[in-house]
Image (cartoon, grey):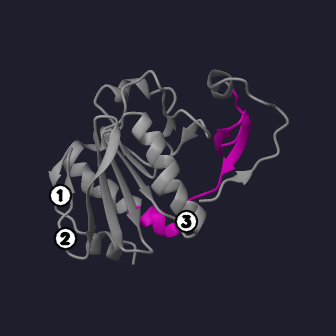
Amino acid sequence: MTPVKQQVEQRFLSFDEYLSYDDGTENLYELFNGELIEVPPECGLNVEIASFLFALFLSVVGYRRIRGHGLELEVRGEPKNRYPDLTIIQEEHSQLLKHRNTLRLGMAPPLLVVEIVSPGDLQREHDYIAKRMQYQDRGIPEYWIIDPPQSTVLVLTLVGDRHTEVGTFQGDDGIQSPQFGALPVTPTQIFAAAG
């Protein structure tokens, strides 16, 4: 989704200062160069795909370890935070996220982050380049890029300090996850679920 500039007069000098801000709404914001950028609602297709994956991972890790679009992930660079479409957190995160659904830089990274590409070249660039670099820097062991326009699922794993490709899955390929093994799902099933 393309961030929408929010009219906010205040500038934030630190991520901690941003975390203490409350505008009384349920809006999600990215912190970009000290300014708030409102994150628009996800498109329906992305929500359907993320919901399908949420249901899939329920039997794999249980409901406490799965977070949807509302999980905020602090990253280095700009913006200073991201809202992945789906995240599998570590066991220790459940207690840490009770008061605020934000994974800080000082916390262990989540096990898996999934981004679903929204239409447009800018969105593709964010997911394939900018977010990949930030998630790699954050030490996230596994990153999926689900690309509806291409009908592919790119699975990346962290080797040393770089995300490397496990594979690009399409059609009836069984998806192989470095963290969770062979999963009972194919790209065809993922994209059909959002039909």
Considering only vertical position in the picture, is 99 above or below 38?
Answer: above
Residue visible at 41% across and 23% down? Answer: 107
User: Could you classify mark 1 by the number of other residues whose Cα lies within 10 Å: few (under 14), some (14-19), or many (20 or more)?
Assistant: few
Query: Is 80 left or right of 134, judged from the image as shown?
Result: right
The residue pinned by badge 1 equals 183
Which of the two residues, 1 or 92, is positioned nearer the viewer here? 1
Residue 29 visible in the snapshot: yes
Question: Sequence-wise, which precedes: disc 2 or disc 3?
Answer: 3
Question: Sequence-wise, which precedes: disc 3 or disc 1?
Answer: 3
Q: CA distance from mark 2 to mark 1?
A: 10 Å
Query: Is 121 left or right of 153, judged from the image as shown?
Result: right
Amino acid type of the residue tagged 3 in the rendering: Cys
Query: Is 121 left or right of 88, judged from the image as shown?
Result: right
Question: Sequence-wise, which precedes: disc 2 or disc 1?
Answer: 2
Query: Is 8 left or right of 73, judged from the image as shown?
Result: right
**Residue 101: horizontal and vertical position, in percent?**
49, 34
Amino acid type of the residue tagged 2 in the rendering: Asp
The residue pinned by badge 2 equals 173
Considering only vertical position in the picture, is 120 above or below 68?
Answer: below
**Residue 16: horizontal and vertical position, in percent?**
62, 22
Which of the two residues, 128 or 34, is positioned nearer the viewer here? 128
Q: CA distance from mark 2 to mark 3?
A: 26 Å
Amino acid type of the residue tagged 1 in the rendering: Leu
**Residue 61: horizontal and vertical position, in percent?**
23, 43
Q: Are marks 2 and 1 in contact (CB under 8 Å)?
A: no
Q: CA distance from mark 3 to mark 1?
A: 26 Å
Residue visible at 70% across and 31% down? Answer: 22
**Residue 136: horizontal and vertical position, in percent?**
40, 40
